[in-house]
Image: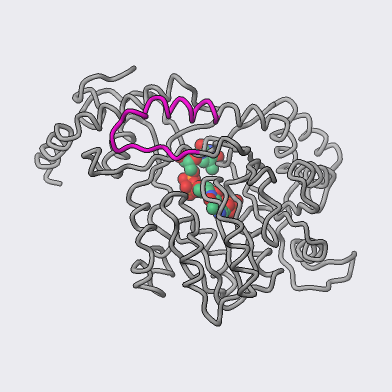
Amino acid sequence: MTKSRVEDLAILGGASAFDERLHVGRPNIGDRRALLARINDMLDRLWLTNNGPFVQEFERRVADFLGVRHCIAMCNATVALEIAARALELHGEVIVPSFTFVATAHALQWQEITPVFCDVDPATHNLDPARVEAMITPRTTGIMGVHVWGRPCAIEALNEIAGRRGLKLIFDAAHAFGNSYKGRMIGNFGLAEVFSFHATKFFNTFEGGAVVTNDDELATKIRLMTNFGFAGYDKVIYVGTNGKMSEISAAMGLTGLESLDEFIAANRLNCATYRAGLQAVPGIKLIAYNETERNNYQYVIVEVDEMATGISRDDLVRVLHAENVLARRYFYPGCHEMEPYRSYFPHAGLLLPETEKLTQRVMSLPTGTAVGPEEIETICAVIRLAVENSQELLRRLAAIRETQHI
Ligand code: T4K
């Protein structure tokens, strides 16, 4: 139902626009029959994990798709980041954005490597190379860029800094599977890149991730570390962990790869529908993808400029939640505001002005194959209604809060 009057908004007592909740991060499933057939094969084979045939096929297909020499599939991207950092012998300090999912920082801190939070470029939401340079100290050993929303980092500038300052450069490419930079697939940059195939990603293996690299030696080391350091039945040659992907995850991955174009087409259409529905709303800006590159379009990210909308991002999220649209405040707060970083570096925010602004402005809207243009038009109509009537909406909300003594 499209709403036209401010009193129709569910937050003011109207009926919710949707009976069922619309989520950010609803998994794309692909061909269910193909998946179930693979699961049957797996059960018949009695081979469930430990470098089984599905995992091997999945690694080959991902490597071919990306045009990269090695793909090591893993149980999730967080462990993949930990293993990559360890294999690269990062230590001391590593420069990362604070405007990312907390896993980026935790993967380092888990190994007692200090994540040094660096500010981002407000235009791209990615590490600002000029700021990176200023954060380097004698303890810095690496830079971990994040391709936030799948939009590539300033790869050349980061490469140049890493080369000149003797630092190791890796990328958290959790959002960027299927995307390209200057015609080359993400996965080919830095010393290694890490993908997430978590259920909430447009392409998923339930839980899963991968490290990809063009470095043969590094790949061998990472593969060993992922499997307890085993170099044969009884021979352990490194300290390792258990980062293995299971066969059922690889079965999901192989099935999803067959529908990748379909997932991307749905995301692309969703992005375009949001863009059309929100383009005339003052203070609402949808982030754009570079149309000359390959994009997965998996995130619909809106920046809310409260000066122009008259309503804050947080109030807009409340309005949407009341309608059963579970918009998310990715990424809020910045990692530097989360523990243990908040206690370790209480003044980090002073060096992160753009990050702090972004964490107040950004929200992520539902997309993927679970939603379509019709739902999106309704969501856009709610946002338009809330912004066009922001003063009246805020007055009524204040009155409700007063009667409820909150
Ligand atoms: N680096 C970056 C830059 C990342 O963004 C991430 C993960 C990582 C590293 C680490 O990757 P992994 O180790 O996870 O492979 C979610 C995801 O759990 C996380 O993978 C993702 N980034 C992050 C951006 O989002 P939450 O805590 O916000 O997820 P949650 O459970 O609230 O789910 C989000 C929405 O999706 C909800 O509305 C529910 C819906 N949902 C979720 C699941 C799991 C479903 O509809 N079905 C489902 O199966 O972190």
Residue 256 lies in quadrant: top right
| Number of numbered discs visible in the structure rendering | 0
Above-or-below relation of 227 to 270: below
Question: In this orientation, which residue lies closer to the viewer: 176 or 31?
Answer: 176
Colour style of the rendered protein structure:
one colour
- State the residue at coordinates (67%, 60%): 190
Q: Residue at x 43, y 31 (%)?
A: 22
Relative to 83, is 382 on the left or the right? left
- The answer to whether residue 237 is above or below residue 317 is below
Can you say which quadrant of the picture contains the N terminus? top left
Instruction: Look at the image and give the residue range highlighted in magenta.
Output: 267-288
- The residue at the far top in this view is 1
Decide: is 306 above or below 271: below
Q: Residue 94 location, x and y as percent?
A: 56, 71
Q: Name the residue: 41% across, 75% down.
A: 344
Give coordinates of residue 5: x percent, y percent. 21, 21
The image position of residue 345, as x and y in percent, is 39, 73
Q: Residue furthest right?
A: 233
Q: Is residue 287 magenta?
A: yes
Residue 340, magenta (yes or no): no
Horizontally, residue 370 falls left or right of residue 212, namely: left
Q: Is residue 246 left or right of residue 161?
A: right
Q: Quadrant of residue 353?
A: bottom left
From the viewer's perspective, is 90 left or right of 342? Answer: right
Where 167 falls versus 155 (above or below)? below
Q: Nearer the viewer, residue 181 or 34?
A: 181
Position of residue 230 measured from the top left corner of the image (x, y, whole percent) = 83, 66
